Image (cartoon, rainbow, N blue to C red):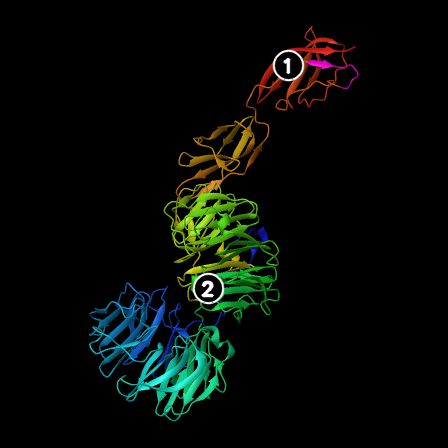
Amino acid sequence: MRSLRLPFFFLLISLNANAQWTRTAGPVGGKSNEILTIGDYLFVNGFDGGIYRSTNKGLTWESVSNGLPVDLRCFAMDAEDEKLFITTHNGTYVSSDLGESWNMLADHSVSGFAIEVSGNEIFVGSSNGAILYSPDSGGTWQLKVSSVGGEGVRHLLKWNGTLWLGTGSNAYYSSDNGSSWTHSPLDLIISSIDTAGDALFISGNDEYGFFGVYRSEDDGVSWTKILSTPETNVPSSGFLKINNSMYATGFRSLYYSDDDGQTWNTQPLPESFNFFQETFIAQVEGDLFISYGDGMLFTADRGLTWERRNIGYKNHTIVQLAKTNQSIISYSELNGISISKDNGGSWKWIPDQDDYRPRQIYAHNNTIIASYLLGIYKSEDEGETWQKTFTLTDDIPGPHAIPDVHLAGWEKSLIYCTYKGVYFSSDMGASWKLRPASSFDTNANILKGFIKQDSVVLLTKDEFFFSADFGDTWQKRAIPEGLFVSYYSVTDMLFESTLTMSTLFGLYKSSDFGVSWKKMECVPDRTIFEMERIGETLIIGTLSGAYGSQNGINWYSAQDGLESARTLAMTIKDAYAFVGTWGKSVWKRPLAELLKPGEILENGEEVPKPIVTNTCSTITVANAKQSFQIKWYRDGSLLANENSTTLHLTSKGIYQVSFENNCDLKMSDPIVLDNAQTTTPKIYNVVTVNGDHKNDYYFMDASLVGSRLNIYNRWGQIVYSSESYKNDWSPEIPGGQYYYMIENECVGKFNGVLTILKP
């Protein structure tokens, strides 16, 4: 992100009595994988945001994640005897008090994608195809199968002694709790498995991609298609049967039947329901609830009218924030782009502009830029309308073969890293110029880029490219030793007197534009997602929250009110700092309060900015300590074997010095020297004042200009004197022999005979 320099009056903002991070009004909704009921209680898994519960049919929601990890990613839920079971990316948990508290049943090394509880038996299907089985309510666990068709387990159901399993390609069943499996004759991509009465129901997509519902009344031996739809490629759906009524959901429609599936009625879902293509259905007191990508839908009339019931249900994981003159824009990889025009008081979702989900956002003045996998869109009216300003031709077979793209910007300048190379725009996307991937001395893809003014940094997995002229010329650098670079691992770059790079493995600094890097060891948390420079204070967002430092050494917690949330994105607007979090949406805090140091968490010896002075051909650094590592640079290049407090110059140039220790690196202001003296100056000893206007003035070398000059006659009397001679004396004294005395603090003293020739 860009470095922000604030005027002093910003620091004089009056503070609220309870100044801390407060949650904004959204964005509302969020991705919910599943919905279920226990009595009149309604539960949804917030995917990234934990578990939410409603006791009033979704009018309000509350988080019930006490005892669960902060970074919980819940994939599936089930209920048995009023106990709530969930499986996550790192474990299986149970709550016996409707979500008030949780206990871990198993600590998985793989992500649990599906869960089925049947009496004392628990089955967990994992992302790699494994089935974990507990016969005793989670007391012990067995690994029942290592792979089912080589795919992740999406659905599980235990019915009539048979365990059913659904993957991305078909259904399987097992009569021995997962020790062996039989391929179902139903050739479908499974989107749900359920049971009601004496029948088994499976929904899914056929070989042509069309979605339908199938019923079996003979334990899965034969199947009857009871619902055909025009919908295609529904990844997850809901099914519900109550007496003779049946309900099924795609991601475009609600389907219901009152005659046990013989005939069906269809009601369309709201248009923006396509926001995330997974739906689940539940019923409380005759009213229907559908969880989906943007929260919760409610209908009391079987889909004739719909309400969004998202109050308090704000589990967006915000990975990027941007600002226009009027608005805050948030971006979530799962939920897309939302905008707030009242500093977080309300939020509006921006529909996707492409077949692919957006990848990044950038904003400047009143313009919003959104990059997609194959193009860039621009809005100049706060997201109301969009125009495509750039198209990346899809000439790689299959959409999944296209590597990630990356957009970055500085004021009106943009860079767009793609598999074809890097595109540059200096007019906010109105025109673009390609630097082909083949023009870089690398065989690796350009993963991402960073920019400030004309300085650009590009990263591959093994290399670092730096340009000081907006991509016209490049210098190749090495990645810091030991740093694993991927699209996600390098998170931000600050361009200052030093380069500061945040990563998921720590904070790195470079004083020579990436020629060498130093890892900073004193940050409180080395998993860093974002940085903002606010005046002299650096704020970082990390795995464990937000931290600030005014000197790079003494870090304080900036977490008050954030509930230990992962802080993934930051921006500054209208005297407030805004952060985007993992599963907890967007928060804000008065800027002046954020910059006020709290409890110091990390202590170390402070590295001050070097104070340098130059005298003659020597630069001296005045505030060095023995514990600092000193490095000298000329024109941005390290001077080998120069590490003392003084540097004797050997040539003209721009000089800087750095102080380093394990906690920080600071660079001095540059000193420009164009009069460095490395050889004995030439002394001129003849002046010819003869009317030809040549050699009429006494002349000195440039290195001696400004010296003290005295001219003596043969009797030792001074006939001319100057304390700072500027080559401006034309002798008006008689011709003959005289004597000069030159004194220069840097160059030395010189004397000799001066001959003045006159006609």
Mark with earlier residue (1, 2) = 2
Q: Are marks 1 and 2 in contact (CB under 8 Å)?
A: no
Give the residues drawn in magenta, as a range: 686-693
Is 206 one of the magenta-colored residues?
no
Q: In the picture shown, does residue 302 fall above or below 327?
A: below
Amino acid type, label 1? Met
Closest to the observer, 133 or 1: 133
Main secondary structure of the magenta stretch:
loop
Closest to the observer, 727 or 679: 679
Displayed quadrant of residue 468? top right
Residue marked by disc 1: 741
- Spatial CA distance of label 1 from label 2 is 74 Å
Residue marked by disc 2: 318
* Residue 489 visible to an observer of this rendering: yes
Q: How many numbered markers are drawn?
A: 2
Q: In the rendering, at what x and y percent does residue 636 appear?
A: 51, 38
Left or right placement of residue 47 versus residue 137 in this view: right
Q: In the rendering, at what x and y percent does residue 167 appear?
A: 32, 73
